[in-house]
Amino acid sequence: MGLTFDELGKRRHGSEATLHFCDALYRIYGSEDLSTALGASFAIEHWANAGFWDELIEGFEKLNGKRPSGAKKFRMGFWRFHQALEAQHAAHTMDELEEAIEDGLISDEVRFRQAAHEMLDACSIFWEGLEASRQGRPYSMTTLKAR
């Protein structure tokens, strides 16, 4: 990628779709309104466990299978660890959601659902932007907002 360590994680390198996702995380997931933050958290944890890690690992395994004999392969330990970790997170968020409801922490069910939907939409925009970049085609948030 041609980036030095000091250049990693800088906003200026993000695509429009990536920045949209990062901003949504900050605004929704990091909301001071507990109903909103819990809705975002619940959605992200369940999205991540709904096949994302399985598909990611499958893709890396396919790439490893296509590498020439003797070529360095992608190490899978990190990805498999996070796959198992996300499965636990999803189970725990169900327990946490039940507790939050019982304890009256979700004061606005509409905001909870809206935050979950907005966070999943932001996830979708992020991945659609990555796919457009991979295919070498433009991706515009302006066009997207019109849909």
Image (cartoon, helix red, strand yellow):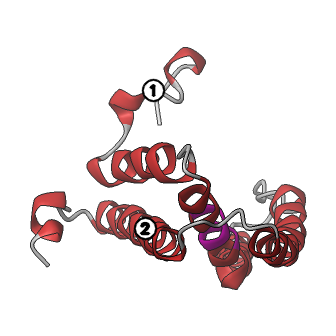
- The answer to whether residue 109 is above or below residue 119 is below
Counting from the top left corner in percent of width and height, residue 103 is at: 81, 67
Rendered residue at 59%/56% (across/down): 37
Rendered residue at 85%/55% (across/down): 78
Report if residue 121 lies within the magenta region.
no
Q: Amino acid at mark 2?
A: Trp
What secondary structure is found at the residue carrying circle 1?
Answer: loop
Residue 140 falls in which quadrant of the image? bottom left
| Residue 92 circle label | none
Rendered residue at 76%/58% (across/down): 74
Rendered residue at 78%/54% (across/down): 72
Image: magenta residue range: 40-45
The residues bearing labels 2 and 1 have C-alpha atoms spaced at a distance of 19 Å
- The answer to whether residue 8 is above or below residue 133 is above
Q: Residue furthest top?
A: 6
Residue 107 falls in which quadrant of the image? bottom right
Q: Amino acid at mark 1?
A: Lys
Disc 2 and disc 1 in contact, CB within 8 angstroms = no
